[in-house]
Amino acid sequence: MEYEIKYRPAYSLLEARLNAGEVVVAEAGAMVYMSPQIQVKTRKREEKSLWKSIKGSLL
């Protein structure tokens, strides 16, 4: 993967060039544009209960 951070320091934008099979994970609403060869998959983030959060922080 090659990348370049543009427009620093305010409103920075990461431009990434991916090789076949490489993956990028982004927050919802974070992607500005993409080439037609990119495949986008979405999934719902698992919501944690209070108990799962406490248990995860203790372990």
Image (cartoon, rainbow, N blue to C red):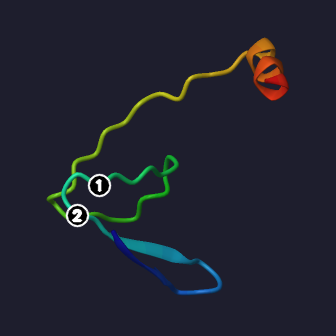
Q: Residue at x 15, y 60 (%)?
A: 36
- Quarter placement of the N terminus: bottom left
Please indicate whether residue 25 sits to the left or right of residue 59 in the image. left
Spatial CA distance of label 1 from label 2 is 6 Å
Relative to 25, 49 lies left or right: right
Q: What type is the residue that disc 1 sits on?
A: Glu
The one nearer the camera, 25 or 8, is: 25
Q: Residue furthest left?
A: 37
Amino acid carrying mark 2 in the image: Asn
Q: Quadrant of residue 19?
A: bottom left
Task: Choose top left, top right, bottom left or bottom right for residue 57.
Answer: top right
> Which secondary structure lies at badge 1?
loop
Between 42 and 22, the one lying in front of the other is 22
Asked whether disc 1 touches disc 2, contact meaning CB atoms under 8 Å apart, the reply is yes
Which of 36/18 is in front?
18
38 or 32: nearer the viewer? 38
Q: Residues within 10 Å of mark 1 (few under 14, many from 20)?
A: few
Q: Report crowding for label 2: few under 14, some 14 to 19, many 20 or more residues within 10 A (C-alpha).
A: few
Query: Could you tell me residue 29's position as x and y percent?
Result: 49, 52
Quadrant holding the C terminus = top right
- Residue at the disc numbered 1: 22
Q: Which residue is mark 2?
A: 19
